[in-house]
Image (cartoon, rainbow, N blue to C red):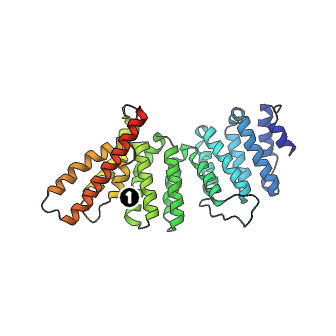
């Protein structure tokens, strides 16, 4: 407790912060300490991270490596929520400069706790919930976009285990990371993401999972593929590449199925809802094809109804996005 007090005082020098973290991680076998002492050690690290960020970032891979060793085997929720905070700090502040091997180790030491299934005991004085742990874990994983390839493979694997709640948690984690990661880091994974999301839409009947898959498609189309900018569209080589690897295969597949029992209007609605730019792209491809099918004498009334519903939904989405874009521009 005396160490904790000194870290909050104005006389705690930044040079002491580095020495303190080094001593905690290399000279103290944290996992052999009782829970209360482990919590104090991890809390002290968090306090120093906040107060002496620049100096501790300078420790680089030494900090990450020794922390992974210190956290290894942790099981107590009161300590884990602190550890996830430290992983978030390491990913956000030094993740871009770490060797790829350490990046993978940081991802592994966090993701091995997924899915969070913790239920607190009745009248637990710590007050930590399963949702608190899930949020802290998601924050840790979304803090570093160098996890992108690892994340996509991990989400696919966990979503394939047949458990609805695990799949939902994996999709929520993917949503959070898509919005947090830079588009450049996500673009190499877009082809794999599209195949995964399409398979989900084909094979899943659960509304919860279909809604979350739609949300991921919407976030990808708006954040990665067709981001809006004030006064126009962002069109760069990276964006064009994202269109080729995600939007184009999605459009080709969905448009080829329009008017059939295999149609996936939910995917088209989601892709159009990401941004005004993504709406314009989807609308320009869907409208002519739907008009042709509506004019075709072979199209039955029962086939026309979902086509008209799709156009109505897309038009409403476009109107909302246009209004939102106009408001942000002004």
- Is 286 positioned to the left or the right of 211 in the image? left
Image quadrant where residue 45 sits: top right
Where's residue 80, x and y in %? 70, 55
Where's residue 31, x and y in %? 78, 55
Q: Is residue 208 visible?
A: yes
Reading the image, the residue beneath label 1 is 198
**Position above or below: 93 against 167:** above
Residue that appears at 52% across and 68% down: 163
Count of numbered circles in the view? 1
Image quadrant where residue 294 sits: bottom left
Residue that appears at 71% across and 47% down: 67
Q: Residue furthest right?
A: 2
Where's residue 255, x and y in %? 27, 54
**Position above or below: 57 against 286:** above
Where's residue 64, x and y in %? 68, 44
Residue that appears at 21% across and 61% down: 304
- Camera-side residue: 252 or 96? 252
Q: Is residue 98 visible?
A: no
Tell me the element at label 1.
helix
- Circle 1 Cα neighbour tier, 10 Å, few/some/many (<14 / 14–19 / ≥20): some
- Camera-side residue: 131 or 100? 131
Image quadrant where residue 111 sits: bottom right
Picture quarter with the C terminus: top left
């Amino acid at each position: 407790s005396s160490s904790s007090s000194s870290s909050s005082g104005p006389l705690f020098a930044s040079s002491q912060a580095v020495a303190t973290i080094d001593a905690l991680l290399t000279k103290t076998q944290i996992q052999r300490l009782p829970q209360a002492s482990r919590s104090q050690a991890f809390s002290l690290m968090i306090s120093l991270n906040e107060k002496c960020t620049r100096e501790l970032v300078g420790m680089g891979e030494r900090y990450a490596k020794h922390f992974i060793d210190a956290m290894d085997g942790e099981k107590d929720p009161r300590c884990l929520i602190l550890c996830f905070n430290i992983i978030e700090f390491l990913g956000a502040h030094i993740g871009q400069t770490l060797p790829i091997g350490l990046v993978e180790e940081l991802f592994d030491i966090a993701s091995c706790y997924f899915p969070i299934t913790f239920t607190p005991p009745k009248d637990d004085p710590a007050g930590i919930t399963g949702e608190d742990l899930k949020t802290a874990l998601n924050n840790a994983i979304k803090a570093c976009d160098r996890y992108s390839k690892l994340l996509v493979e991990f989400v696919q694997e966990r979503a394939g285990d047949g458990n609805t709640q695990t799949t939902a948690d994996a999709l929520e984690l993917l949503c959070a990371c898509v919005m947090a990661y830079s588009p450049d880091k996500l673009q190499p994974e877009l082809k794999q993401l599209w195949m995964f999301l399409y398979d989900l839409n084909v094979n899943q009947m659960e509304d919860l999972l279909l809604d979350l898959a739609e949300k991921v498609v919407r976030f990808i189309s708006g954040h990665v593929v067709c981001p809006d900018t004030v006064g126009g569209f962002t069109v760069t080589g990276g964006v064009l590449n994202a269109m080729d690897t995600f939007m184009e295969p999605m459009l080709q597949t969905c448009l080829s199925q329009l008017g059939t029992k295999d149609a996936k209007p939910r995917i088209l609605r989601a892709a159009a809802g990401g941004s005004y730019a993504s709406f314009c792209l989807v609308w320009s491809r869907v409208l002519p094809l739907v008009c042709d099918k509506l004019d075709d004498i072979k199209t039955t009334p029962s086939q026309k109804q979902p086509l008209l519903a799709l156009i109505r939904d897309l038009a409403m989405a476009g109107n909302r996005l246009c209004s939102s874009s106009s408001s942000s521009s002004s």
